[in-house]
Every structure is written in C-alpha cells, then in structure tokens.
Image (cartoon, rainbow, N blue to C red):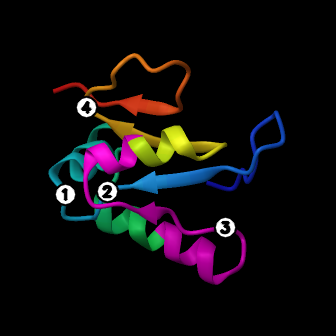
C-alpha cells in the first residue's frame, strides 16, 4: 500500500468493490487476511496522512474489470477474468 508506482513508472491505481460486497469481503479475509473494516482503516490512515491515495470504489465486478482494463497502472480483484490480455487482476477462487 505504500508503493505508489509500478517499476515501469505508471502510478498504481487501485479499484475495489464496496465494503459490503461479498467478493470484497472474501478478498479481504482470504487474500489479505484482514477484515474489510481493517482494510478501510488502513486506507483512511494512509490517505489522511498524505502517504497514499484511497482506492476507487466501483459498484460491480464487471465495472471493476472494465475500469482496470481502461486505466494504465490499475489493479483490482475478481472471481473470473475473461482472457483479455495482461491485466492486473487478482483472481479470487469461488
């Protein structure tokens, strides 16, 4: 969360689903091993201290994938990803 750009120089842009979304809850618990409210507190602390930028919240998994595909340096998570080339998506198993 403290890394602000990729090795190729693109700024990292994080996309997430709303805190209440089941996929966001699974991602937080299974991949990050923290509760969604803990993740939100970390983001808030980094954002308000000026050390980071808050993630962009999108409403649906489809919108999340679309945003990642259209935004250079973006990263996010999804259950399924159609093969659309190299994309920074962390896949969450069903």
In this view, the residue in front, 41 or 18, is 18
Mark 2 near mark 1, Cβ–Cβ under 8 Å?
A: yes
Mark 1 near mark 4, Cβ–Cβ under 8 Å?
A: no
Left or right, 80 with reference to 57:
left
| Quarter of the figure that contains the N terminus | bottom right
Say which of marks 3 and 4 sits in front.
4
40 in relation to 85, above or below: below
Category of crowding for the residue at label 2, using alpha-carbon neighbours closer than 10 angstroms: few (below 14), some (14–19), many (at least 20) = many
Question: Disc 2 and disc 3: Cα gap in Å?
Answer: 18 Å
Say which of marks 2 and 3 sits in front.
2
Instruction: Name the element at disc 1.
Output: loop
Question: Disc 3 and disc 1: Cα gap in Å?
Answer: 23 Å
Sequence order check, earlier mark of 2 and 3: 2
Mark 3 near mark 1, Cβ–Cβ under 8 Å?
A: no
The residue positioned 68% from the left and 81% from the top of the image is 49
88 in relation to 83, above or below: below
């Amino acid at each position: 969360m403290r890394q602000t750009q990729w090795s190729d120089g693109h700024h990292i842009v994080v996309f997430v689903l709303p805190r209440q979304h089941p996929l966001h809850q699974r991602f937080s618990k299974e991949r990050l091993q923290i509760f969604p409210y803990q993740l939100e507190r970390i983001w808030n602390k980094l954002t308000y201290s000026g050390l980071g930028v808050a993630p962009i919240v999108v409403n649906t998994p489809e919108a999340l994938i679309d945003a990642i595909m259209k935004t250079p340096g973006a990263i996010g998570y999804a259950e399924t990803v159609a093969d659309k080339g190299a994309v920074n998506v962390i896949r969450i198993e069903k």
